[in-house]
Amino acid sequence: MTQSLDHNSVRLETEPSWSVFYRPRFWCALSVTISVFPLIWMGGLVTSHGVGMSVPDWPNSYGYNMFLFPPSQWVGGIFYEHTHRLLGTLSGFLSVALVAMTWAPARKLKKRMVFGWITLISLLLTGVLVGIKIYLIQTQSATYEFIKSFSHLYVTTGSVALFAGCFWLARQREERRWVRWLTVVQLLAIIIQGTLGGLRVTEVNTTLAIIHGCFAQLFFALTGFTTLVMTRWWHESFEDRRSDRGVFGRRAVLTGAILVLLIILQLVVGATMRHHEAGLAIPDLPLAFGKWLPPMDEESLRQANAIRAWDYHLSGQMSLVQMWLHFGHRIGAVLVTTAVTILAFQVFLKLHECRTAVYLTVSLCILVTIQFTLGVLAVYTGLVKDITALHVAFGALTMLTGVLTTAAIARVYGIRKPVADLHSTPVRSSQGLVTA
């Protein structure tokens, strides 16, 4: 027996609710991603200029609150290091705002009033404290060190007002639970990243500096993926999933996963090489001292160091470890380029129906070409600081694009739709409940 439906009374909702496409949330996620790129680039300049310890205290800057450090003292290496810290703080604040916008703590009126009062009281208290500081300065009734310490109070209250204001504005909750927790993971990641940066300064530890540099690039990729899942494309791509291309899609996803792993290993080797001053351990390209392989024993190492000194006028004696770190970075560049080439062939020949995957793959090819060129120029120019910093920055962009390309392919050419991402609701008819 067939069931007739009154089309006027049938309401089919196959689209997700509007909160999934809440535009301010997307723009906030995108802002986090955009803010991280100059942070990585500036971090590359800090390492290239060797000024990682130009501001020896943390979280203060020469005793000042970090946000009140006088711009007149931003000179030399202090400019790079202090700007790097401020950019990191901006990324952290935006990450907090993103968590607030996904969890929406103020979606209920009572909590909204609480955050509103906290914001108002904190703003008023900040104004009072600033006024007290101005009075102390004008009357000279307090020491300079006391005034510097007193400044921490109104920076704290101002920060509370800023965060409470973000919570007060966050009233539309993200429906996907896994996305909400993804933003929490992102926030925890940048907290860990900032702590690693601070410990690198206070502990004067090179290993922490290497971890700090690598973790930053992983965090950049994470922010990009978070932004991707908040786009309308992420949901609408389900409607065009190509199960008939599932075999080719799985192969491309595997290639993409291998590519991302290779890029991560390449980043680790590159960061270790930079912090151990092995960027010019092998000064000629594409060979190594005229041979296919670098020195493998003490005698050949002695000859290689002599070539560096007499032919290339480079000071310092390189060890075998430094030589092979440099050579390993070159091998990694070849492997990454090969993986990108294989992925490009797979996408262009078998998966070209997905324009997003095609565009991302084209971008990936362009970025790898630029990155490879910058690496070559870095060696031939003797590690010019700006070129080396750009090499680090484009490495991060390559990592990000590799992750996004792999995620896009997996999204479109998956076989089965995850239940968590299906937002269809039942159809209500005059006869009862019918499955949509």
Image (cartoon, grey):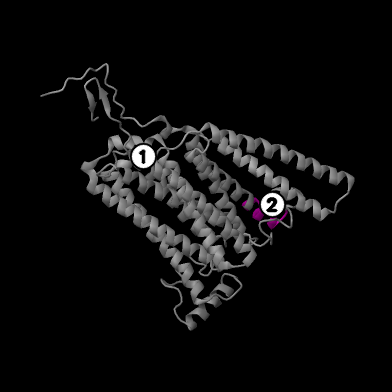
Q: Amino acid at mark 1?
A: Thr
Residue lying at 54% horizontally and 41% vertically, measured from the top left: 97
Residue 73 in the image: x percent, y percent? 75, 52
Marker disc for residue 356: 1
Outermost residue toward the front? 110
What SS does tag 2 mark?
helix
Q: Is residue 153 magenta?
A: no
Left/right placement of residue 94 relative to residue 242 reads right
Left or right placement of residue 182 versus residue 84 in this view: left
Q: Nearer the viewer, residue 164 or 405?
A: 164
Residue beneath the point at 62% across and 57% down: 46
Q: Which residues are magenta?
A: 75-84
Q: Which mark is residue 66?
A: 2
Task: Please state the horizontal and vertical placement of residue 280, each as a whole percent of the image.
Answer: 54, 67
Q: Nearer the viewer, residue 419 or 289?
A: 419
* Residue at 61% across, 34% down: 116
